[in-house]
Image: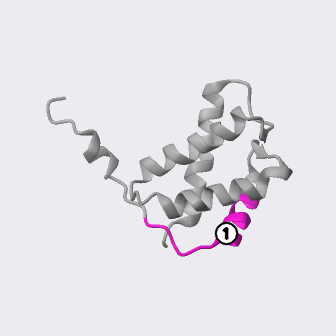
Amino acid sequence: MINYSYSKELNINPVTFREFDLDDIREVFAKIFESYNPKVKDQVFDSFCEDFYNLTTQIHATSEKIWRMVITDMLFCYEDKGYLEGAAKDSGVKRKQFAIIANVLIGKLRVK
């Protein structure tokens, strides 16, 4: 453990996002939420997409791990406020679902 560095671990998988706009984000999230159990309620879907788009323009992190944490935290935040429906009751299961969604989203937005 003497050589362990958390900052090195965060930089293992750098991620670079492709060019996208708010409409791209809406399309990506619509497809993702069609495939996975947690769904953002219809009345806040646009706001959710705008929040995510704003995050991508404000956070200049290149670490895939940081982005997975940000996306997972965003989903938990929406769930805590009651804007996410159909999520599992168990927190461990939710974390796995949200981590899967984060991985899928990063894959769809990554430069190919």
Residue 111 is situated, as x and y percent measured from the top left of the image, at 48, 71
Residue 54 is situated, as x and y percent measured from the top left of the image, at 58, 60
The residue lying toward the viewer, choosing from 16 and 34, is 16
The residue lying toward the viewer, choosing from 107 and 81, is 81
Query: What residue did someone put label 1 on?
Result: 22
Residue 4 is inside the magenta segment? no
Residue 81 sits in quarter = top right
Check the picture and name the quadrant holding the N terminus. Answer: top left
Q: Secondary structure at mark 1?
A: helix
Q: Look at the image and tell me whether residue 99 can be seen.
A: no
Q: Look at the image and tell me whether residue 88 can be seen.
A: yes
- The residue segment tinted magenta is 16-31
Mark 1: give few (<14), some (14-19) or many (20+) Cα within 10 Å.
some
State the count of labels. 1
Residue 80 is situated, as x and y percent measured from the top left of the image, at 70, 32
Residue positioned 37% across, 59% down in the render:
14
Residue positioned 48% across, 51% down in the render:
67
Left or right relative to 100: residue 66: left
Residue 93 is situated, as x and y percent measured from the top left of the image, at 65, 30
